[in-house]
Amino acid sequence: MKRLVTLLLTFAAAVANYAAWLGWDQKRTVHPDGSETGPYEAWQVIGLVIVLLVGGAYAAWRWYPAMVVIGVTAGLTLAVSYDWSDDDTGLWAVGATMVCVGTLMASSFVAAIVTMVRQVQRPAV
């Protein structure tokens, strides 16, 4: 039961984090030469990543690291898929796949580091 709660909490936290940092910004910036950038600014993406790293590390320390990896990865992937799926080119699926793989790799790395630190800090009995 605790594993399921960990999974659901980290899933919901990842979705909420995405909504707070990136979900509200949908406008692209059009430059005088006609080129477009955006819709996100660097500070928004950096904020998202920092909160996910710190929150994920804390959750992995307190609960079940594997469930944290799955919850964060699934939550962020669902959020970007929902937000980007209105793209007519279909390239949103490529972006969502890249987010999924990157989040899986990063959260697995963080969970592995947290697990190693926890094992080192526990005294041998």
Image (cartoon, rainbow, N blue to C red):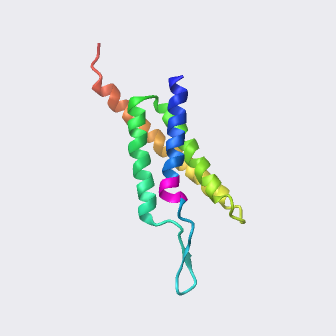
**What is the x, y in percent for residue 61?**
38, 32
Asked if residue 35 is positioned above or below residue 92 in the image, the reply reads below
The kind of secondary structure the magenta stretch mainly shows is helix
**What is the x, y in percent for residue 109?**
44, 41
**What is the x, y in percent for residue 25?**
53, 64
Asked if residue 36 is positioned above or below residue 48 in the image, the reply reads below
Residue at the (34%, 28%) spot, across then down: 118
Between residue 80 and residue 120, name the one nearer to us: 80
Asked if residue 104 is positioned above or below residue 93 in the image, the reply reads above
Q: Residue furthest top?
A: 125
Image quarter of the N terminus: top right
Image quarter of the C terminus: top left
Q: Is residue 20 magenta?
A: yes
Residue at the (72%, 65%) spot, across then down: 88
Across the whole image, how many numbered discs are drawn on residues? 0
Residue at the (51%, 36%) spot, across then down: 9
Span of residues in magenta: 19-23
Q: Is residue 84 left or right of residue 121?
A: right
Residue at the (47%, 45%) spot, across then down: 106
**What is the x, y in percent for residue 105?**
50, 44
Asked if residue 62 is positioned above or below residue 91 in the image, the reply reads above
Q: Is residue 27 magenta?
A: no
Q: Is residue 89 left or right of residue 50?
A: right
Q: Is residue 31 left or right of residue 53?
A: right
